[in-house]
Image: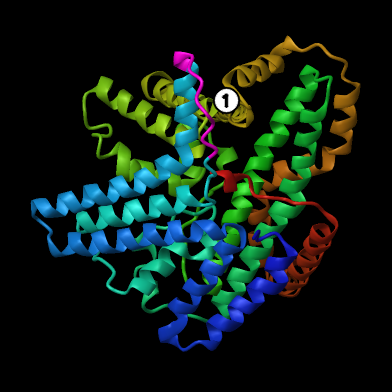
Amino acid sequence: MLFSSAAFLYSFLPLTIAVYFLMPRRLKNAALLLMSLIFYAWGEPRYVVLMVLSITQGYIFARLIGKSRGTKKAKAYLIISLVLSLGMLGVFKYANFFAESFAAVFGLKIAALNIALPIGISFYTFQLISYVIDVYRADVEPQRDYVAFAAYISMFPQLIAGPIVRYSDIEAELTARAYGADKAAYGARRFILGLGKKVLIANVLAELVNAFKASGEKSTLFYWIYAAAYMLHVYFDFSGYSDMAIGLGSIFGFTFPENFNYPYIAASITEFWRRWHMSLSSWFRDYVYIPLGGSRVKKPRALLNIATVWMLTGLWHGADWNFVMWGIMFAALLIAEKTLLLGFIKKHRAIGHAYTLLVVMLCFIMFDASSVGEGFAAIAALFGANAADNTEALYYLKSYAVPLTVAAFGATPLPKRIKAKLEATRIGGAIMAIAEPVALAALLCLCTAYLIDGSFNPFLYFRF
């Protein structure tokens, strides 16, 4: 079930809110767990059991670790839990990839495994892993209430595409969380804005991306239009989902971590990854990069740590070689910045910003490619390798000029700053107090109209 669907907006969500708030406080986690399982089963009924098994092993081994801290048993329990979590992820996400790659390298004929990818497995597996490790490190205490723990892992607002919520983020809220009109209003506002990002911007830009892919004649200009459109599409699709997840969390009394902070204003790749998919970046930092030694080791080892983390980040996004290459490209850029470029970039922020936008665009072309070869061919086409006629490209540029401009403007902090300046004045504040609820209601109605009239519109990160 999609957040951006009429079934969710006008059936599942109102029913869930009603059930949740009618329940006494002691049963709210149970209500949230039940509705989350129904939500997941709506699209993946056969994989509910897999998720419940994952939750159960994480719960059991965390309890065992908590009871045996400081002993060899605790480490053994940690290893068993990690092997089970990573084993499930490996089988369902990577078995096809490794089998096909092995067959290709050795010229073997292997029957296709055709193992389907359970939706959200990358996200809930990482939450389980971080929880068990945090219990082992004594950063958190193991949750005794199975229902509360299961509700944390399976919570439908963030189950499918994050943010990756660590147990410490909402530990206190699992037992005692605050409700109120202000928190619900903030949640509704955040959800509607995220819905608008997805339906009115990301989906429209997806039409342009699909038109490019369907075209038989792709000029250099068309490649540039596609690259810009895809770059903005990814941002509004994923940040829109994150906004909706954070908004829903707030309605139910939870505070989820932010996932985006205007990444396209970054002036380096280092800064970009502090602003893009922040919950994933911090996860790899705390559970892979730092345990490997981070930057505290000798320089060659530190650079190897960066390369390792980004190979894994690429694989996390998808089981295909273009994602591995995407990770390698970012690793190379981060290593180049660390060893050569960062000093210059810091002194010349405008140049750094232009460089960052360009290389992020190139990396996202690889991200969207069906193969490494196709990715590099598309990158080459940006720089004149395709000399097809520009008539079709100019048609689409004219047709989508407004959505592209709105998206580029919306990807900056300018709308937020303008709103803040208006609210800072007495007259502006009074106008905004009336205009904002009206605008949000109109935005919801407009999104609904688009959804009823439109076609299937899955979130990009659902496939990860």
Measured as percent of width and height from the top left, residue 313 is found at: 44, 36
Residue 346 visible in the displayed image: no
* Nearer to the camera, 44 or 434: 44
Nearer-the-camera pick, 195 or 317: 317
> Residue pushed farthest left?
71
The residue type indicated by label 1 comes to Val
Side of 72 where 378 appears, left or right: right
Q: Total label count?
A: 1
Q: Main secondary structure of the magenta part?
A: loop
Q: Position of residue 252 (x, y in %)?
A: 52, 74
> Could you classify mark 1 by the number of other residues whose Cα lies within 10 Å: few (under 14), some (14-19), or many (20 or more)?
some
Rendered image quadrant of residue 433: bottom right
Q: Quadrant of the N terminus?
A: bottom right
The quarter of the picture where residue 371 lies is: top right
Q: Is residue 306 above or below residue 279?
A: above
Of 69 and 431, the residue lying toward us: 69
Q: Is residue 263 visible?
A: yes
As drawn, is 61 to the left or to the right of 180? left
Measured as percent of width and height from the top left, residue 218 is found at 80, 20
The residue at the point 79 percent across, 59 percent down is: 451
Q: Please name the residue shown 44% across and 56% down the image.
A: 50
Kindly identify the residue that appears in the image at 34 percent across and 63 percent down. 56
Residue 330 is one of the magenta-drawn residues: no
Quadrant in which residue 11 is drawn: bottom right
Q: In the picture shown, does residue 179 fall above or below 322? A: below
Q: Residue at x 57, y 82 (%)?
A: 19
Q: Which residues are magenta?
A: 105-114
Element marked by disc 1:
helix
| Vertical order, 438 against 138 (above or below) | below
**Disc 1 marks which residue?**
359
Nearest to the observer: residue 265 or residue 397: 397
Residue 305, given in percent of the width and then of the height, sits at 31, 29
